[in-house]
Image (cartoon, helix red, strand yellow):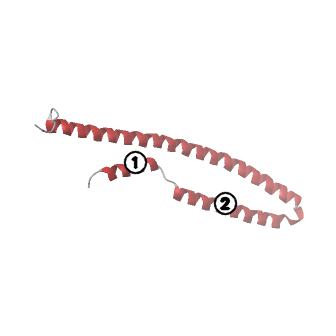
Amino acid sequence: MDEPLQEPGGWLATGKRILRSVGDLAQSRLELFLVELQEERIRLFDALLLVGAGVVCALMTLALLTFTLVVVFWEYRVYVLVLLTLAYGAGAGAAFWALRNRLRQWQSFAATLDQIKKDRACLPK
C-alpha cells in the first residue's frame, strides 16, 4: 500500500537531474566570476586613470613650488633645495608604503570565493 513514489526513469533520470543541477550551479558561479572580473577591470582602469592624473598634477605642483621657493629664498637656495628634496623623498616613501599596504589587503573575486566556500560546506563529506 505505502510504496515509495518512483519517478519515471529511475536512476538515469536522477543522474541527469544531478548533472543538470551541478551544471546550473557551475554556470551561476561562472557568471558571478565574470561579473566580478568586469568590475575589477573597471576599478583597475579607474584607479590607473586617477593615478596618472594625480601624478601629472603633483609633479607640476612640486616643480612650481620648488621654483617659487628657490626664487623667494635666493640667498639660501642650496638649503632650500636640500630641504625640499628631503620633504619630497619623505612624501614618496609614505606614498609607496601606503600603496604596499593597500596592495596587501586587495581581495579580488571575494564574492565568488565566498560562494564556492558555501557550496563546499553544503556538500556531504
The label shown at residue 92 is 2
Judging by the rendered image, the residue that carries numbered circle 1 is: 115
Q: Position of residue 29 (x, y in %)?
A: 38, 42
- Relative to 13, 97 lies left or right: right
The label shown at residue 125 is none
Crowdedness of circle 2 by 10 Å Cα count: few (<14), some, many (20+)?
few
- Residue at screen point 32% across, 50% down: 122
Question: What is the CA distance from the residue labelled 2 to the residue labelled 1?
Answer: 39 Å
Q: Position of residue 46 (x, y in %)?
A: 59, 43
- Relative to 115, 81 lies left or right: right
Amino acid identity at mark 1: Gln
Foreground residue among 7 and 95: 7
- Residue at screen point 29% across, 41% down: 22
Examine the image and state in which quarter residue 7 appears. top left
Q: How many marks?
A: 2
Q: Position of residue 64 (x, y in %)?
A: 79, 52
Foreground residue among 15 and 98: 15
Instruction: Indicate which disc, 2 or 1, sits on the residue closer to the N terminus.
Output: 2
- Residue at screen point 65% across, 62% down: 94
The image quadrant where one finds the N terminus is top left
- Relative to 81, 118 lies left or right: left
Amino acid identity at mark 2: Ala
**Up/down of 97 relative to 9, above or below:** below
At mark 2, the secondary structure is helix
- Residue at screen point 54% across, 41% down: 42
The image quadrant where one finds the C terminus is bottom left
